[in-house]
Image: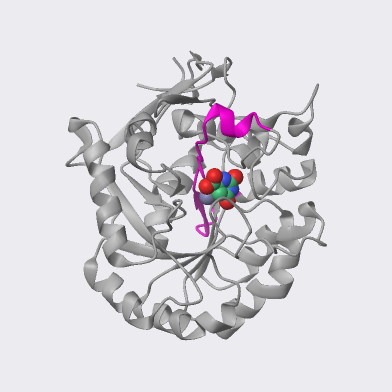
């Protein structure tokens, strides 16, 4: 086998993940723990994770649901859900607790379980100041919620209306622009200071918006921010494979039951945890940039968060693996990305 058919990298981390709660955890966690050492656990549960105490019990439920071999090794990195009422004292408490690594800003109404999110970011300025002081990163769902704004423009308008101002007003605040989907987001991150980074999903680099409508409506390709035009997909691949330390891996794997997706009012979210690193290997390979995969997947994230890089290694091989039509998910099932198709790379 030639070198480019196999690649060994430091074990990666997933800097943006949804695993849900309770009976749903056990079905999806092994996919992540098989591939990643750590994952940033998004706090948008039905009852959002707004306090350190809630984050601690959610962390315990996650560890309980992990397979025995991962209980001591896999590290769930917890986050808090920002609201208009989050207290400065909670930020200090979060820093002292050690297991809370970031605070997530969902504009109220922007996405799944975001109704209790932030309706007035100015009301959070004291909290943002405390986060800057504590070195606690702000993770941003960057979309405006104004229903008059075209759904494909919501990220671009958010940059203009909110994000540029936050970055300017809080130069010492670490900001992760989550799951970026446009060339405008890439440009903002590139021109900002080293305190501003971004995660990029595999699905936003593999699909453009046609994928939602090819041969009929495809609910399993519906996510938020919504898939964009080809030129934006290309800009994301270019950013991810550039070697720029500001860009790192965040799958935004977001499981929903089949019923919640194949529905007259289908939920947003694409489940990619079953190919959490393999899909990125495919993207980097196609871009002739496999040598840049380790930085993106394993180095840039911990460096940004101020955490140590992992020591273990994993090896990926160019070998096709069939993807099932579904995986068990609670008492129901989740339909994975590319269901019934193939992953082009596999983990040894
Ligand atoms: O597609 C998405 N799904 N985007 C989000 O922002 C949330 C996520 C979810 O929790 O389902
Ligand atoms: Zn997400």
Horizontally, is 241 left or right of 328 in the view? right
Within the magenta stretch, is there residue 133?
no
What predominant SS class does the magenta segment belong to?
loop
Where is residue 78 shown, x and y percent of the image?
A: 34, 57
Where is residue 130 shown, x and y percent of the image?
A: 40, 82
Q: Nearer the viewer, residue 199 or 323?
A: 323
Residue located at (66% from left, 32% from top): 263
Horizontally, is 134 left or right of 333 in the view? left
Q: Nearer the viewer, residue 186 or 142?
A: 142
Residue located at (31% from left, 59% from top): 55
Q: Nearer the viewer, residue 299 or 96?
A: 96
Q: Can residue 200 be seen here?
A: no
State the scheme by which the image is colored.
Answer: one colour
Where is residue 59 shown, x and y percent of the image?
A: 27, 51
Within the magenta stretch, is there residue 245?
yes
Q: Quadrant of the C terminus?
A: top left
> Residues in magenta?
240-263
Badge count: 0
Is residue 208 positioned above or below 118 on the image?
A: above
Q: Quadrant of residue 20?
A: top left
Q: Can residue 134 be seen here?
A: yes
Where is residue 139 shown, x and y percent of the image?
A: 49, 63
Residue located at (32% from left, 32% from top): 26
Q: Quadrant of the N terminus?
A: top left
Q: Nearer the viewer, residue 122 or 24?
A: 24
Is residue 68 positioned above or below 104 on the image?
A: above
């Amino acid at each position: 086998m030639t070198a480019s058919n196999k690649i060994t990298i430091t074990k990666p981390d997933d800097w943006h993940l949804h695993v849900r709660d309770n009976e749903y955890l056990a079905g999806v966690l092994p996919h992540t723990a098989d591939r990643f050492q750590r994952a940033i656990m998004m706090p948008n549960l039905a009852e959002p994770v707004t306090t350190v105490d809630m984050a601690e019990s959610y962390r315990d439920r996650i560890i309980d649901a992990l397979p025995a071999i991962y209980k001591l090794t896999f590290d769930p990195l917890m986050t808090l859900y920002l609201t208009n009422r989050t207290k400065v004292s909670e930020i200090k408490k979060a820093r002292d607790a050690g297991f809370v690594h970031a605070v997530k800003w969902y504009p109220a109404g922007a996405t799944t379980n975001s109704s209790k999110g932030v309706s007035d970011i100015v009301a959070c300025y004291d909290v943002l100041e405390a986060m800057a002081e504590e070195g606690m990163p702000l993770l941003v769902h960057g979309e405006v919620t104004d229903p008059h704004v075209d759904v494909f423009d919501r990220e671009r308008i958010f940059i203009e209306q909110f994000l540029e101002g936050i970055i300017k007003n809080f130069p010492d605040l670490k900001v992760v622009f989550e799951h970026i989907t446009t060339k405008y987001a890439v440009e903002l991150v590139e021109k900002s200071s080293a305190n501003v980074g971004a995660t990029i999903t595999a699905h936003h680099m593999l699909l453009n918006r046609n994928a939602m409508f090819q041969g009929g409506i495809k609910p399993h390709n519906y996510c938020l921010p919504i898939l964009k035009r080809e030129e934006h997909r290309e800009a994301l691949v270019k950013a991810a494979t550039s070697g720029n330390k500001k860009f790192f891996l965040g799958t935004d794997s977001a499981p929903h039951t089949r019923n919640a997706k194949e529905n007259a009012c289908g939920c947003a979210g694409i489940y990619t945890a079953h190919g959490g690193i393999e899909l990125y290997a495919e993207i980097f390979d196609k871009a002739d940039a496999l040598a840049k995969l380790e930085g993106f997947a394993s180095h840039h994230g911990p460096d940004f968060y101020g955490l140590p890089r992992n020591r273990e290694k994993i090896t990926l091989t160019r070998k096709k693996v069939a993807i099932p039509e579904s995986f068990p998910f609670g008492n129901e099932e989740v339909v994975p990305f590319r269901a019934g198709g193939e992953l082009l790379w596999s983990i040894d």
